[in-house]
Amino acid sequence: MNEYDVLIDIFRFIRDYHTGTYTLPDVCRKLIRHMQSSGYEVQTVDNNHRDYWIIRVEDQRYKIVRNKGWSSYEVIMTA
């Protein structure tokens, strides 16, 4: 799969989690387990921020973001 397919897979997974019900660390840990069970090599790159985590899937980084006032999480492909 290319990085855009992974981006869509991540988006489809996290869209089911509401920011008022699930914390960012919970969602990211569930996402990492999901991606690993799907056969991806996944690592946490940066989890020291309150409003986002950065994970690496294969060789591409993705930022999982909790935006203030939003009810859902967002994923952004980063450099």
Image (spheres, rainbow, N blue to C red):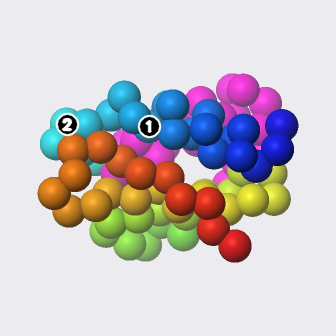
Q: Which residue is mark 2?
A: 21
Instruction: Based on the picture, tell me whether residue 78 belongs to the magenta stretch.
Output: no
Which of the 4 image quarters holds residue 7?
Answer: top right
On the picture, is 25 further left or further right than 30? Answer: left
Can residue 25 be seen here? The reply is no
Name the residue located 16 percent from the left edge and 57 percent from the top edge: 69
Q: Tag 2: Cα neighbours inside 10 Å, few (<14), some, or many (≥20)?
A: few
Left or right: residue 44 versus residue 71 is right
**Magenta-colored segment: predominant secondary structure:** helix
- Of marks 1 and 2, the one in the foreground: 1
**Distance from Cα at disc 1 to Cα at disc 2:** 12 Å
What kind of element bears circle 2?
Answer: loop
Q: Is residue 32 magenta?
A: yes
**Residue 63 drawn at (x, y percent):** 53, 61
Residue drawn where x is 69% and y is 26% of the image: 37
Q: Quadrant of the C terminus?
A: bottom right
Mark drawn on residue 70:
none
- In the depicted view, which residue is nearer to us: 26 or 69? 69
Q: Which residues are magenta?
A: 24-44
The image shows residue 36 at horizontal and vertical percentages of 69, 34
Spot occupied by residue 13 in the image (x, y as percentages of width and height): 50, 31
Which residue appears at 43% of the width and 72% of the height? Answer: 48
Classed neighbour count for the residue bearing mark 1: other residues with Cα under 10 Å, few (<14), some (14–19), many (≥20): some
Dot 1 and dot 2 residues touching (CB under 8 Å): no
Which image quarter holds the N terminus?
Answer: top right
Q: Is residue 43 left or right of residue 11?
A: right
Report the residue marked by disc 1: 14
Does residue 68 lie above or below 23 as drawn? below
- Expressed as whole percent of the image width and height from the top left, the position of residue 26 reads 37, 43
Q: Quadrant of the rendered structure where residue 66 is?
A: bottom left
Q: Amino acid at mark 2?
A: Thr
- The picture quadrant where one finds residue 49 is bottom left
